[in-house]
Image (tube, rainbow, N blue to C red):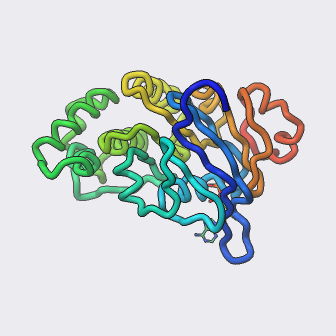
Amino acid sequence: MSGPEVILRVENVTKRFGGVVALNDVTLSVGRGEIVGLIGPNGSGKTTLFNCITGVYKPDRGRVFFMGRDITGLQPHEVAKLGIARTWQKVRPFRNLTVLEAVTTGALLRTDSVEEARKTAVEVLELIGLPREEWGRLGSEITLMEHKLVDLARALATGPQLLLLDEIAAGLRPHEQERLAEVIKKVWSDRGLTIVVVEHVMRFVMSLSKRVVVLHEGRVIAEGPPEEVASNPRVIEAYLGIKPV
Ligand SMILES: Nc1ncnc2c1ncn2[C@@H]1O[C@H](COP(=O)(O)OP(=O)(O)OP(=O)(O)O)[C@@H](O)[C@H]1O
């Protein structure tokens, strides 16, 4: 890939679960500063790819490079420390923590000082625009949209260079998805981040990404600008379940 520095490189990654080949020789690159959409039907391997990048799973074959360094097989906390953060497909409730405390836990990756971590959390919460009166509320008291923003804030508080968002728009109403896309664009430009967005909601992907990679049955079947990819017959065939633009 020419152009910007390659920040993430996945090379020939294969991951099997028993007889299921979740990823089959996947190769892709992400340039620094890009927002790349990763799409594909249910079960095509998107979350498994995130798990192989972040050290949740070790690939059976292939390598993962981050900023030129081979990170294959590192533990999740080591990968996080190097500067890769993620959100999870399922909202992870933090019933007994407040919003501010939950985001502070993210910042504790980089410091032992709770005071310093809280400062980072405040900065991030201000950046994403979650109103101050929400910061003292418990996880059990906030809406799904607020949970998504807190997940995003917690990931940002770890101080990443690369952010992996796993279906963060799922379950939100269209106007909430629009707001979330605006927040993501804001943090992307403010923090100079690189972002990979796994998403089923095509409109959401298209509003964020100039380049989309399509997975189908564990393989990359197409890659390019969203409009081009959306009209690619191979993608349409693989992807009958896709939501219309
Ligand atoms: N821990 C696991 N154990 C066994 N099989 C798994 C595991 N994780 C994923 N798989 C299988 O690997 C394949 C890819 O799953 P994955 O969750 O990566 O797909 P996905 O594209 O993220 O799907 P979705 O859009 O539904 O979230 C599926 O067949 C899935 O059942």
Residue 143, x across and y down, in percent: 38, 43
Q: Residue at x 61, y 28 (%)?
A: 209
Residue 24 vertical position relative to residue 206 in the rendered view, above or below = below
Q: Residue at x 48, y 60 (%)?
A: 55
Q: Is residue 145 left or right of residue 46?
A: left
Q: State which quarter of the image contains the C terminus.
A: top right
Image quarter for residue 126?
A: top left
Q: Residue at x 53, y 58 (%)?
A: 51
Residue 88, x across and y down, in percent: 47, 52
Image quarter for residue 214?
A: top right
Residue 55 vertical position relative to residue 39 in the rendered view, above or below = below
Q: Is residue 60 left or right of residue 125?
A: right
- In terms of image quarters, where does ligand 1 lie? bottom right
Residue 215, x across and y down, in percent: 73, 48
Q: State which quarter of the image contains the N terminus.
A: top right
Residue 198, x across and y down, in percent: 59, 43
Q: Is residue 17 left or right of residue 143?
A: right
- Identify which residue, 71 or 210, lies in the foreground: 71
